[in-house]
Image (cartoon, rainbow, N blue to C red):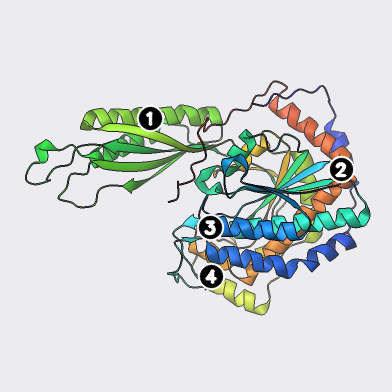
Protein backbone atom coordinates (compact mmCIF):
# COMPACT_ATOMS: atom_id res chain seq x y z
CA UNK A 1 0.00 0.00 0.00
CA UNK A 2 1.23 3.48 -0.88
CA UNK A 3 0.11 6.71 0.73
CA UNK A 4 1.43 9.85 -0.93
CA UNK A 5 1.71 13.17 0.88
CA UNK A 6 3.17 16.51 -0.26
CA UNK A 7 2.65 20.24 0.14
CA UNK A 8 4.80 21.26 -2.84
CA UNK A 9 3.07 23.35 -5.48
CA UNK A 10 4.93 24.59 -8.56
CA UNK A 11 3.42 26.43 -11.53
CA UNK A 12 3.50 24.76 -14.94
CA UNK A 13 5.27 27.79 -16.41
CA UNK A 14 8.32 26.92 -14.31
CA UNK A 15 8.26 23.38 -15.74
CA UNK A 16 8.07 24.66 -19.30
CA UNK A 17 10.91 27.13 -18.72
CA UNK A 18 13.14 24.50 -17.18
CA UNK A 19 12.57 21.98 -19.95
CA UNK A 20 13.18 24.62 -22.60
CA UNK A 21 16.57 25.36 -21.05
CA UNK A 22 17.81 21.75 -21.29
CA UNK A 23 20.92 21.36 -23.43
CA UNK A 24 19.89 19.15 -26.35
CA UNK A 25 23.35 18.58 -27.74
CA UNK A 26 24.38 14.93 -27.69
CA UNK A 27 26.99 14.18 -25.05
CA UNK A 28 30.13 12.78 -26.75
CA UNK A 29 30.92 10.53 -23.79
CA UNK A 30 27.41 9.11 -23.73
CA UNK A 31 27.43 8.52 -27.49
CA UNK A 32 30.81 6.83 -27.22
CA UNK A 33 29.42 4.41 -24.63
CA UNK A 34 26.30 3.74 -26.70
CA UNK A 35 28.32 3.02 -29.83
CA UNK A 36 30.77 0.83 -27.91
CA UNK A 37 28.00 -1.57 -26.89
CA UNK A 38 25.94 -1.50 -30.09
CA UNK A 39 27.07 -4.82 -31.58
CA UNK A 40 26.72 -6.61 -28.25
CA UNK A 41 23.13 -5.56 -27.71
CA UNK A 42 22.10 -6.09 -31.29
CA UNK A 43 23.29 -9.66 -30.79
CA UNK A 44 21.43 -9.85 -27.46
CA UNK A 45 18.20 -8.69 -29.11
CA UNK A 46 18.47 -11.26 -31.90
CA UNK A 47 19.24 -14.10 -29.49
CA UNK A 48 16.17 -13.27 -27.41
CA UNK A 49 14.14 -13.02 -30.65
CA UNK A 50 15.38 -16.46 -31.65
CA UNK A 51 14.54 -18.06 -28.28
CA UNK A 52 11.04 -16.49 -28.18
CA UNK A 53 10.35 -17.47 -24.56
CA UNK A 54 6.85 -16.83 -23.24
CA UNK A 55 5.87 -15.14 -19.98
CA UNK A 56 7.55 -16.39 -16.79
CA UNK A 57 9.48 -18.95 -18.88
CA UNK A 58 12.11 -16.45 -20.11
CA UNK A 59 14.99 -18.21 -18.36
CA UNK A 60 17.59 -17.87 -21.13
CA UNK A 61 16.55 -14.32 -22.01
CA UNK A 62 16.69 -13.17 -18.40
CA UNK A 63 20.03 -14.90 -17.83
CA UNK A 64 21.58 -13.30 -20.92
CA UNK A 65 20.58 -9.78 -19.87
CA UNK A 66 21.87 -10.40 -16.34
CA UNK A 67 25.14 -11.73 -17.73
CA UNK A 68 25.75 -8.58 -19.77
CA UNK A 69 24.82 -6.23 -16.94
CA UNK A 70 26.97 -8.12 -14.45
CA UNK A 71 29.93 -8.05 -16.85
CA UNK A 72 29.54 -4.28 -17.07
CA UNK A 73 29.73 -3.56 -13.36
CA UNK A 74 26.14 -3.87 -12.18
CA UNK A 75 25.11 -5.70 -9.04
CA UNK A 76 22.31 -8.20 -9.63
CA UNK A 77 19.39 -9.25 -7.44
CA UNK A 78 17.68 -12.23 -9.01
CA UNK A 79 14.28 -13.81 -8.48
CA UNK A 80 12.66 -10.69 -7.04
CA UNK A 81 8.93 -10.55 -6.19
CA UNK A 82 8.85 -14.39 -6.12
CA UNK A 83 9.44 -14.49 -9.89
CA UNK A 84 12.44 -16.58 -11.06
CA UNK A 85 12.91 -14.55 -14.28
CA UNK A 86 12.53 -11.11 -12.66
CA UNK A 87 15.62 -9.23 -11.51
CA UNK A 88 17.12 -5.85 -10.63
CA UNK A 89 20.54 -4.68 -11.83
CA UNK A 90 22.05 -1.54 -10.29
CA UNK A 91 25.04 0.74 -10.42
CA UNK A 92 25.18 3.45 -7.76
CA UNK A 93 27.54 6.14 -6.57
CA UNK A 94 24.79 8.02 -4.76
CA UNK A 95 22.48 10.65 -6.20
CA UNK A 96 18.98 10.27 -7.65
CA UNK A 97 17.65 6.82 -8.50
CA UNK A 98 16.56 6.45 -12.13
CA UNK A 99 14.94 3.18 -13.15
CA UNK A 100 14.80 1.79 -16.68
CA UNK A 101 12.30 -0.96 -17.46
CA UNK A 102 13.14 -3.91 -19.71
CA UNK A 103 10.81 -6.62 -21.02
CA UNK A 104 11.63 -9.87 -22.83
CA UNK A 105 8.56 -12.13 -23.11
CA UNK A 106 7.18 -13.41 -26.43
CA UNK A 107 3.60 -14.18 -27.47
CA UNK A 108 2.23 -17.71 -27.99
CA UNK A 109 1.94 -18.59 -31.67
CA UNK A 110 3.20 -16.21 -34.36
CA UNK A 111 6.29 -18.35 -35.03
CA UNK A 112 7.53 -16.17 -37.89
CA UNK A 113 10.92 -16.20 -39.61
CA UNK A 114 12.84 -13.01 -40.40
CA UNK A 115 11.29 -13.00 -43.85
CA UNK A 116 9.02 -10.46 -45.60
CA UNK A 117 6.63 -13.34 -46.32
CA UNK A 118 4.48 -15.32 -43.89
CA UNK A 119 6.74 -18.26 -43.15
CA UNK A 120 6.35 -20.04 -39.82
CA UNK A 121 9.23 -21.48 -37.84
CA UNK A 122 8.89 -25.02 -36.52
CA UNK A 123 11.49 -24.80 -33.76
CA UNK A 124 9.63 -22.50 -31.34
CA UNK A 125 6.06 -22.13 -30.06
CA UNK A 126 6.00 -18.33 -29.83
CA UNK A 127 7.10 -15.14 -31.53
CA UNK A 128 8.19 -11.64 -30.51
CA UNK A 129 5.16 -9.98 -32.08
CA UNK A 130 5.32 -7.08 -29.61
CA UNK A 131 9.07 -6.57 -29.85
CA UNK A 132 9.94 -7.19 -26.23
CA UNK A 133 13.30 -8.69 -27.25
CA UNK A 134 14.19 -5.22 -28.52
CA UNK A 135 12.68 -3.60 -25.43
CA UNK A 136 14.88 -5.53 -23.00
CA UNK A 137 18.03 -5.16 -25.10
CA UNK A 138 17.74 -1.39 -25.67
CA UNK A 139 16.94 -0.69 -22.03
CA UNK A 140 19.92 -2.67 -20.74
CA UNK A 141 22.10 -1.03 -23.42
CA UNK A 142 21.02 2.41 -22.25
CA UNK A 143 21.56 1.55 -18.58
CA UNK A 144 25.15 0.44 -19.23
CA UNK A 145 25.91 3.53 -21.31
CA UNK A 146 24.55 5.79 -18.55
CA UNK A 147 26.61 3.95 -15.93
CA UNK A 148 29.81 4.56 -17.95
CA UNK A 149 28.84 8.21 -18.44
CA UNK A 150 28.28 8.64 -14.67
CA UNK A 151 31.78 7.33 -14.00
CA UNK A 152 33.47 9.31 -16.76
CA UNK A 153 31.83 12.61 -15.75
CA UNK A 154 32.03 11.95 -12.00
CA UNK A 155 28.30 12.56 -11.74
CA UNK A 156 26.39 11.27 -8.72
CA UNK A 157 23.57 8.94 -9.58
CA UNK A 158 22.02 5.49 -9.36
CA UNK A 159 20.95 3.75 -12.55
CA UNK A 160 18.75 0.72 -12.02
CA UNK A 161 17.58 -1.75 -14.66
CA UNK A 162 14.40 -3.67 -13.92
CA UNK A 163 14.15 -7.02 -15.68
CA UNK A 164 10.38 -7.34 -15.95
CA UNK A 165 8.95 -10.63 -17.29
CA UNK A 166 5.49 -11.62 -18.49
CA UNK A 167 4.08 -8.27 -19.57
CA UNK A 168 1.75 -10.09 -21.98
CA UNK A 169 -1.06 -11.06 -19.63
CA UNK A 170 1.18 -11.93 -16.70
CA UNK A 171 1.45 -8.52 -14.98
CA UNK A 172 5.06 -9.11 -13.96
CA UNK A 173 5.59 -5.47 -12.99
CA UNK A 174 2.50 -5.45 -10.78
CA UNK A 175 4.07 -8.04 -8.48
CA UNK A 176 7.26 -5.99 -8.44
CA UNK A 177 5.31 -2.86 -7.50
CA UNK A 178 3.40 -4.79 -4.85
CA UNK A 179 6.72 -6.02 -3.41
CA UNK A 180 7.84 -2.41 -2.93
CA UNK A 181 10.67 -2.58 -5.46
CA UNK A 182 9.99 0.96 -6.69
CA UNK A 183 9.71 2.57 -3.25
CA UNK A 184 13.01 4.47 -3.49
CA UNK A 185 12.94 5.32 -7.20
CA UNK A 186 12.81 8.97 -8.29
CA UNK A 187 11.77 8.42 -11.91
CA UNK A 188 11.24 5.51 -14.31
CA UNK A 189 11.97 5.46 -18.05
CA UNK A 190 10.79 2.93 -20.62
CA UNK A 191 9.99 2.49 -24.31
CA UNK A 192 8.12 0.20 -26.66
CA UNK A 193 8.59 -0.99 -30.23
CA UNK A 194 6.19 0.52 -32.74
CA UNK A 195 5.69 1.48 -36.38
CA UNK A 196 6.36 5.18 -35.73
CA UNK A 197 8.42 7.48 -33.51
CA UNK A 198 6.64 9.31 -30.69
CA UNK A 199 7.05 10.34 -27.06
CA UNK A 200 3.53 11.36 -26.14
CA UNK A 201 1.94 11.83 -22.74
CA UNK A 202 0.05 8.60 -23.23
CA UNK A 203 -2.57 6.95 -21.06
CA UNK A 204 -3.90 3.42 -21.51
CA UNK A 205 -6.73 1.13 -20.51
CA UNK A 206 -6.85 -0.64 -17.19
CA UNK A 207 -7.58 -4.33 -17.50
CA UNK A 208 -8.30 -7.49 -15.56
CA UNK A 209 -8.32 -11.08 -16.74
CA UNK A 210 -9.42 -14.46 -15.46
CA UNK A 211 -9.74 -18.08 -16.51
CA UNK A 212 -13.26 -19.46 -15.96
CA UNK A 213 -13.29 -23.24 -15.49
CA UNK A 214 -16.53 -25.16 -15.88
CA UNK A 215 -16.90 -28.74 -14.68
CA UNK A 216 -19.68 -31.10 -15.68
CA UNK A 217 -20.30 -34.83 -16.05
CA UNK A 218 -18.91 -36.86 -18.94
CA UNK A 219 -21.07 -39.38 -20.76
CA UNK A 220 -21.53 -40.90 -24.21
CA UNK A 221 -22.83 -38.06 -26.36
CA UNK A 222 -25.08 -40.38 -28.40
CA UNK A 223 -25.78 -43.35 -26.14
CA UNK A 224 -26.53 -41.58 -22.85
CA UNK A 225 -26.49 -37.79 -23.24
CA UNK A 226 -29.10 -37.41 -20.48
CA UNK A 227 -26.56 -38.75 -18.00
CA UNK A 228 -24.03 -36.03 -18.80
CA UNK A 229 -23.71 -32.29 -18.24
CA UNK A 230 -21.51 -30.44 -20.71
CA UNK A 231 -18.85 -28.11 -19.32
CA UNK A 232 -18.54 -26.73 -22.85
CA UNK A 233 -22.23 -25.79 -22.77
CA UNK A 234 -21.39 -23.73 -19.69
CA UNK A 235 -18.60 -21.92 -21.53
CA UNK A 236 -20.77 -21.27 -24.58
CA UNK A 237 -23.69 -20.04 -22.49
CA UNK A 238 -21.35 -17.66 -20.64
CA UNK A 239 -19.91 -16.37 -23.90
CA UNK A 240 -23.39 -15.74 -25.30
CA UNK A 241 -24.40 -13.73 -22.25
CA UNK A 242 -21.18 -11.70 -22.23
CA UNK A 243 -21.64 -10.91 -25.91
CA UNK A 244 -25.11 -9.57 -25.11
CA UNK A 245 -23.52 -7.42 -22.39
CA UNK A 246 -21.53 -5.51 -25.00
CA UNK A 247 -24.55 -3.37 -25.91
CA UNK A 248 -24.84 -2.15 -22.33
CA UNK A 249 -21.28 -1.31 -21.29
CA UNK A 250 -19.44 1.98 -21.97
CA UNK A 251 -18.18 2.21 -25.54
CA UNK A 252 -14.57 2.68 -24.39
CA UNK A 253 -14.68 -0.83 -22.91
CA UNK A 254 -13.09 -3.88 -24.48
CA UNK A 255 -13.86 -7.54 -23.72
CA UNK A 256 -11.94 -10.41 -25.35
CA UNK A 257 -12.02 -14.13 -24.77
CA UNK A 258 -10.59 -17.38 -26.09
CA UNK A 259 -11.73 -20.93 -25.30
CA UNK A 260 -8.64 -22.68 -23.97
CA UNK A 261 -10.25 -26.06 -23.24
CA UNK A 262 -13.37 -27.44 -24.87
CA UNK A 263 -13.15 -31.24 -24.87
CA UNK A 264 -11.20 -33.72 -26.95
CA UNK A 265 -13.75 -35.87 -28.76
CA UNK A 266 -17.20 -34.96 -30.15
CA UNK A 267 -18.77 -38.18 -28.88
CA UNK A 268 -17.72 -37.52 -25.29
CA UNK A 269 -19.62 -34.90 -23.31
CA UNK A 270 -16.77 -32.76 -21.91
CA UNK A 271 -16.59 -32.61 -18.15
CA UNK A 272 -14.01 -29.82 -18.21
CA UNK A 273 -13.96 -26.62 -20.27
CA UNK A 274 -12.21 -23.30 -19.81
CA UNK A 275 -12.51 -19.80 -21.24
CA UNK A 276 -9.96 -17.01 -20.73
CA UNK A 277 -11.34 -13.44 -20.50
CA UNK A 278 -9.88 -9.93 -20.64
CA UNK A 279 -11.86 -6.86 -19.54
CA UNK A 280 -10.57 -3.34 -20.30
CA UNK A 281 -11.63 0.26 -19.67
CA UNK A 282 -9.72 3.52 -19.08
CA UNK A 283 -10.84 3.57 -15.43
CA UNK A 284 -9.89 0.72 -13.14
CA UNK A 285 -13.11 1.17 -11.13
CA UNK A 286 -15.15 0.51 -14.27
CA UNK A 287 -12.98 -2.50 -15.13
CA UNK A 288 -13.83 -4.00 -11.75
CA UNK A 289 -17.53 -3.28 -12.23
CA UNK A 290 -17.64 -4.93 -15.68
CA UNK A 291 -15.54 -7.84 -14.47
CA UNK A 292 -18.03 -8.54 -11.68
CA UNK A 293 -20.81 -8.61 -14.29
CA UNK A 294 -18.79 -11.15 -16.30
CA UNK A 295 -18.51 -13.27 -13.16
CA UNK A 296 -22.28 -13.11 -12.74
CA UNK A 297 -22.70 -14.26 -16.34
CA UNK A 298 -20.45 -17.24 -15.60
CA UNK A 299 -22.46 -18.13 -12.51
CA UNK A 300 -25.71 -17.83 -14.44
CA UNK A 301 -24.34 -20.04 -17.21
CA UNK A 302 -23.42 -22.68 -14.67
CA UNK A 303 -26.92 -22.65 -13.20
CA UNK A 304 -28.53 -22.89 -16.62
CA UNK A 305 -26.36 -25.83 -17.73
CA UNK A 306 -26.25 -27.60 -14.34
CA UNK A 307 -22.47 -27.35 -14.25
CA UNK A 308 -20.10 -25.81 -11.75
CA UNK A 309 -17.78 -22.87 -12.36
CA UNK A 310 -14.75 -21.41 -10.62
CA UNK A 311 -12.45 -18.66 -11.81
CA UNK A 312 -8.86 -17.62 -11.27
CA UNK A 313 -7.79 -14.00 -11.70
CA UNK A 314 -4.75 -14.10 -13.94
CA UNK A 315 -3.67 -10.48 -14.04
CA UNK A 316 -4.79 -6.90 -13.58
CA UNK A 317 -3.22 -3.60 -14.66
CA UNK A 318 -3.86 0.03 -13.83
CA UNK A 319 -4.14 2.56 -16.63
CA UNK A 320 -0.90 4.36 -17.49
CA UNK A 321 -0.61 7.73 -15.74
CA UNK A 322 1.23 10.30 -17.90
CA UNK A 323 3.78 12.66 -16.41
CA UNK A 324 4.18 15.63 -18.74
CA UNK A 325 7.23 17.00 -16.93
CA UNK A 326 9.27 13.91 -17.77
CA UNK A 327 7.50 13.28 -21.04
CA UNK A 328 8.42 16.67 -22.50
CA UNK A 329 12.09 16.07 -21.69
CA UNK A 330 11.94 12.72 -23.46
CA UNK A 331 10.12 14.22 -26.46
CA UNK A 332 12.79 16.90 -26.86
CA UNK A 333 15.48 14.24 -26.81
CA UNK A 334 13.62 12.20 -29.44
CA UNK A 335 13.34 15.30 -31.64
CA UNK A 336 17.04 15.93 -31.19
CA UNK A 337 17.95 12.39 -32.28
CA UNK A 338 15.57 12.37 -35.25
CA UNK A 339 13.94 9.52 -37.12
CA UNK A 340 15.19 6.41 -38.88
CA UNK A 341 16.71 6.15 -42.37
CA UNK A 342 16.40 2.89 -44.32
CA UNK A 343 19.17 1.56 -46.51
CA UNK A 344 18.26 0.48 -50.05
CA UNK A 345 18.00 -3.16 -48.93
CA UNK A 346 15.87 -2.22 -45.93
CA UNK A 347 13.59 -0.16 -48.16
CA UNK A 348 13.04 -3.15 -50.44
CA UNK A 349 12.31 -5.39 -47.46
CA UNK A 350 9.89 -2.79 -46.07
CA UNK A 351 8.07 -2.58 -49.43
CA UNK A 352 7.43 -6.33 -49.39
CA UNK A 353 6.13 -6.16 -45.81
CA UNK A 354 3.99 -3.12 -46.56
CA UNK A 355 2.23 -4.95 -49.41
CA UNK A 356 0.94 -7.55 -46.91
CA UNK A 357 -0.67 -5.01 -44.57
CA UNK A 358 -4.41 -4.38 -44.41
CA UNK A 359 -5.29 -0.67 -44.20
CA UNK A 360 -1.79 0.34 -43.03
CA UNK A 361 -2.62 4.04 -42.71
CA UNK A 362 1.07 5.01 -42.89
CA UNK A 363 3.48 4.90 -45.79
CA UNK A 364 7.11 3.90 -45.94
CA UNK A 365 9.03 7.04 -45.08
CA UNK A 366 7.02 7.82 -41.96
CA UNK A 367 9.78 6.17 -39.91
CA UNK A 368 11.93 9.21 -40.75
CA UNK A 369 9.56 11.52 -38.86
CA UNK A 370 8.87 12.28 -35.21
CA UNK A 371 5.19 12.56 -34.31
CA UNK A 372 4.16 15.91 -32.77
CA UNK A 373 3.90 15.95 -29.00
CA UNK A 374 0.38 15.49 -27.67
CA UNK A 375 -1.63 13.81 -24.96
CA UNK A 376 -3.10 10.54 -26.19
CA UNK A 377 -4.83 7.35 -25.14
CA UNK A 378 -4.25 3.78 -26.27
CA UNK A 379 -6.89 1.09 -25.89
CA UNK A 380 -4.28 -1.51 -25.06
CA UNK A 381 -3.04 -2.16 -21.55
CA UNK A 382 0.33 -2.56 -19.87
CA UNK A 383 1.67 -3.31 -16.42
CA UNK A 384 3.73 -0.12 -16.79
CA UNK A 385 0.44 1.40 -15.63
CA UNK A 386 0.91 0.16 -12.08
CA UNK A 387 4.46 1.51 -12.02
CA UNK A 388 3.17 4.91 -13.16
CA UNK A 389 0.81 5.14 -10.19
CA UNK A 390 3.66 4.83 -7.66
CA UNK A 391 6.52 6.74 -9.35
CA UNK A 392 6.72 9.37 -12.14
CA UNK A 393 7.43 7.80 -15.54
CA UNK A 394 8.06 8.64 -19.17
CA UNK A 395 8.13 6.45 -22.25
CA UNK A 396 8.60 6.56 -26.00
CA UNK A 397 7.92 4.47 -29.08
CA UNK A 398 10.33 4.02 -31.96
CA UNK A 399 9.83 2.62 -35.46
CA UNK A 400 11.14 -0.91 -35.14
CA UNK A 401 8.43 -2.10 -37.58
CA UNK A 402 7.51 -1.06 -41.09
CA UNK A 403 5.12 1.95 -40.97
CA UNK A 404 1.52 0.77 -40.66
CA UNK A 405 2.40 -2.58 -39.07
CA UNK A 406 0.11 -3.75 -36.28
CA UNK A 407 1.53 -5.11 -33.05
CA UNK A 408 0.88 -8.80 -32.39
CA UNK A 409 1.25 -9.64 -36.07
CA UNK A 410 3.60 -11.88 -38.05
CA UNK A 411 4.92 -8.75 -39.78
CA UNK A 412 6.03 -7.35 -36.40
CA UNK A 413 7.85 -10.59 -35.60
CA UNK A 414 9.55 -10.55 -39.00
CA UNK A 415 10.84 -6.99 -38.77
CA UNK A 416 11.90 -7.50 -35.16
CA UNK A 417 14.44 -10.02 -36.38
CA UNK A 418 15.74 -7.69 -39.10
CA UNK A 419 18.09 -4.71 -39.21
CA UNK A 420 15.03 -2.42 -39.42
CA UNK A 421 14.11 -3.49 -35.90
CA UNK A 422 17.66 -2.97 -34.68
CA UNK A 423 17.70 0.63 -35.98
CA UNK A 424 14.65 1.46 -33.89
CA UNK A 425 16.30 -0.26 -30.94
CA UNK A 426 19.35 2.01 -31.15
CA UNK A 427 17.16 5.11 -31.31
CA UNK A 428 15.34 3.96 -28.16
CA UNK A 429 18.61 3.33 -26.32
CA UNK A 430 19.86 6.80 -27.28
CA UNK A 431 16.73 8.62 -26.10
CA UNK A 432 16.54 6.63 -22.84
CA UNK A 433 20.20 7.42 -22.10
CA UNK A 434 19.81 11.10 -23.06
CA UNK A 435 16.81 11.47 -20.77
CA UNK A 436 18.50 9.77 -17.83
CA UNK A 437 21.50 12.08 -18.33
CA UNK A 438 19.22 15.14 -18.24
CA UNK A 439 17.62 14.01 -15.00
CA UNK A 440 20.98 13.43 -13.33
CA UNK A 441 22.27 16.83 -14.46
CA UNK A 442 19.04 18.68 -13.60
CA UNK A 443 17.57 17.02 -10.50
CA UNK A 444 15.08 19.88 -10.24
CA UNK A 445 13.23 18.18 -13.11
CA UNK A 446 12.69 15.20 -10.84
CA UNK A 447 11.30 17.48 -8.15
CA UNK A 448 8.86 18.98 -10.63
CA UNK A 449 7.89 15.54 -11.92
CA UNK A 450 7.14 14.35 -8.39
CA UNK A 451 5.06 17.44 -7.77
CA UNK A 452 3.02 16.80 -10.91
CA UNK A 453 2.59 13.18 -9.90
CA UNK A 454 1.37 14.05 -6.41
CA UNK A 455 -0.99 16.71 -7.73
CA UNK A 456 -2.44 14.14 -10.12
CA UNK A 457 -2.96 11.15 -7.81
CA UNK A 458 -3.83 13.21 -4.73
CA UNK A 459 -2.17 13.33 -1.34
CA UNK A 460 -4.17 10.41 0.05
CA UNK A 461 -3.86 8.00 -2.87
CA UNK A 462 -3.40 4.38 -1.82
CA UNK A 463 -2.27 1.72 -4.25
CA UNK A 464 -4.01 -1.65 -4.26
CA UNK A 465 -3.32 -4.05 -7.15
CA UNK A 466 -6.30 -5.15 -9.23
CA UNK A 467 -5.04 -8.73 -9.05
CA UNK A 468 -5.25 -8.71 -5.25
CA UNK A 469 -2.95 -10.89 -3.19
CA UNK A 470 -2.55 -13.78 -5.60
CA UNK A 471 0.95 -15.11 -6.24
CA UNK A 472 2.53 -14.70 -9.68
CA UNK A 473 0.94 -17.23 -12.11
CA UNK A 474 4.25 -18.76 -13.12
CA UNK A 475 2.59 -21.49 -15.19
CA UNK A 476 0.01 -19.35 -17.03
CA UNK A 477 1.70 -19.94 -20.39
CA UNK A 478 2.40 -23.66 -19.89
In front of the other: label 3 or label 2?
Answer: 2
Residue at image position (61%, 42%) is 173
Tell me the SS state at disc 3: loop
Q: Residues within 10 Å of mark 2 (few under 14, many from 20)?
A: few
How far apart are labels 2 and 1 at the CA level? 49 Å
Q: Position of residue 363 (x, y in %)?
A: 60, 65
Tell me the SS state at disc 1: helix
Label annotation for residue 406 = 3
Q: Which residue is mark 1?
A: 295
Q: In the rendered view of the protein, which quadrant contains the N terminus?
A: top right
Q: Earlier in the sequence, mark 4 or mark 1?
A: 1
Near-viewer residue (13 or 283): 283
Near-viewer residue (343 or 426): 426
Tell me the SS state at disc 2: loop
Near-viewer residue (269 or 196): 269
Q: Residues within 10 Å of mark 1 (few under 14, many from 20)?
A: some
Amino acid sequence: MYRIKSKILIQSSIIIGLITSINLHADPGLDKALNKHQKTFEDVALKIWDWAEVGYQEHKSSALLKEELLANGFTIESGVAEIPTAFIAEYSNGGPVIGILGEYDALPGLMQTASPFKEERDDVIAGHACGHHLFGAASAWAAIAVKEWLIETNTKGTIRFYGTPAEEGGSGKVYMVRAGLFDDVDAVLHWHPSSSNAANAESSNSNKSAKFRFTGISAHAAGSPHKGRSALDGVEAMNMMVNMMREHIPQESRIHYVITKGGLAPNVIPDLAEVYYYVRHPRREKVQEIFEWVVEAAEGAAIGTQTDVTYEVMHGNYSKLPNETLQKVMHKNLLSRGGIQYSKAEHEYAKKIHQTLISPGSMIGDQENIRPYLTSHTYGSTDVGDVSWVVPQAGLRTATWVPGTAAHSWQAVSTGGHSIGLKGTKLAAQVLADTAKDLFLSPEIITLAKTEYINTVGEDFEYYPLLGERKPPLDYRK
